[in-house]
């Protein structure tokens, strides 16, 4: 983890002339953007996968009519169709899964008082008046919701709510473009175990970022906020 700490510290030093005391926060945003840039090819592949799944809907509807009285055979036929067309029903999860190591490293980095036997100097960095290693509860206990640190969180909450609302509308619009399921038929996603539930929850996922900002160290929250914003813009471009 000391190598990762050196990377964040090095980025902060580079950004110091531009961002001053908030250079480490800017470094986290830049680091997140670099991670998202690395996984962008997977995001493009996920977008192609979703379009391919949409193109399969007429054939899935035909399978549904053919195996209407045999749900197990229908599920097997739908999975076989996805396999034959080389379309993964869960390919959209890959970009998020690939980011998890970077997120957990950052979370651990700003939750540790020591790194390599030495005091963690990164905890002294701030975003304006809010320490990067602190949480919203700390800000509430030190000046209240409208104190110096509290106002940083208020601004983050407002920004995240705006991004979440944009992402919600985008997701609903994307789902509305999918072919309609015939009356009385099961949704095709339900033929893949667990996918139906994921589809129902998906429009609300961005609002969970508000919980992240509230309970995580500010540094980890910045990673999630930056990544969520990138995702919203990326999806608006890839799924237009």
Image (spheres, rainbow, N blue to C red):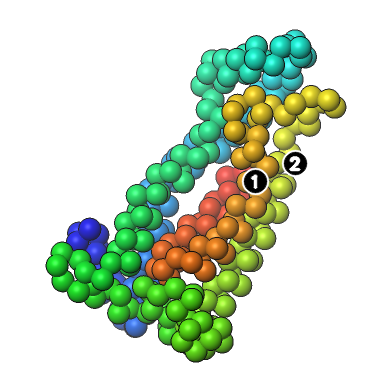
Q: Quick check: marks 1 and 2 in contact, CB under 8 Å?
A: no
Q: Secondary structure at mark 2?
A: helix
Image: 94 above or below 128: above
Above or below: residue 55 compared with residue 7? above
Q: Name which residue lies at 57% across and 15% down.
A: 80
- How many marks do you count on the picture? 2
Instruction: Please name whichever residue, 124 or 168, is drawn nearer the observer in this view of the structure.
Output: 124
Question: Which quadrant of the figure contains the C terminus?
Answer: top right
Mark nearer the viewer, 1 or 2: 1
Quadrant position of residue 75: top right
Residue situated furthest right in the rendering:
183
Residue at x 15%, y 64% (from the top left corner) = 116
Is residue 47 something one can see in this rendering? yes
In the image, is residue 134 above or below residue 62?
A: below
Q: Crowding at label 1, few (<14), some or many (≥20) Cα neighbours within 10 Å?
A: few
Residue found 61% across the figure and 33% down from its top: 195
Checking the image for residue 236, the label placed there is: none
**Residue toward you, 22 or 188:** 188
Q: Position of residue 88 (x, y in %)?
A: 52, 27
Coordinates of residue 212 in the picture (x, y in percent):
50, 62
Q: Label 1: which residue?
A: 201
Q: Which residue is mark 2?
A: 176
The image quadrant of residue 76 is: top right
Badge 2 local density, few (<14 within 10 Å), some, or many (20+)?
few
Q: Position of residue 115 (x, y in %)?
A: 20, 66
Q: Is residue 55 visible?
A: no
Going from N to C along the chain, the mark reached first, 1 or 2, is: 2
Under circle 1, the secondary element is helix
Q: Does residue 198 appear to the left or right of 176 in the view shown?
A: left
Where residue 112 sits in the image (x, y, percent)?
28, 67
Could you tell me which residue is drawn at 22 percent across and 58 percent down? 1
């Amino acid at each position: 983890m000391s190598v990762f700490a050196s990377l964040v510290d090095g980025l902060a030093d580079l950004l110091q002339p531009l961002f001053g005391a908030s250079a480490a926060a800017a470094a986290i945003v830049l680091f997140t953007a670099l991670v998202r840039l690395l996984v962008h090819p997977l995001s493009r592949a996920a977008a192609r996968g979703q379009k391919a799944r949409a193109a399969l809907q007429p054939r899935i509807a035909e399978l549904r009519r053919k195996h209407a009285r045999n749900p197990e055979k229908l599920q097997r036929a739908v999975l076989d169709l996805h396999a034959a067309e080389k379309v993964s029903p869960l390919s959209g999860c890959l970009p998020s899964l690939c980011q998890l190591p970077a997120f957990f490293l950052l979370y651990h980095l700003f939750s540790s008082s020591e790194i390599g036997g030495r005091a963690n100097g990164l905890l002294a960095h701030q975003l304006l008046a809010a320490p990067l290693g602190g949480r919203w509860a700390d800000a509430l206990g030190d000046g209240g919701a409208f104190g110096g640190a509290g106002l940083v969180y208020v601004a983050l909450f407002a920004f995240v709510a705006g991004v979440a609302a944009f992402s919600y509308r985008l997701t609903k619009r994307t789902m509305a473009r999918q072919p309609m399921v015939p009356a009385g038929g099961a949704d095709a996603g339900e033929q893949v175990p667990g996918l139906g539930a994921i589809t129902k929850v998906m429009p609300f996922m961005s609002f969970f970022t508000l919980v992240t900002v509230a309970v995580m160290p500010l540094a980890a929250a910045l990673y999630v906020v930056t990544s969520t914003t990138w995702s919203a813009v990326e999806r608006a471009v890839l799924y237009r």
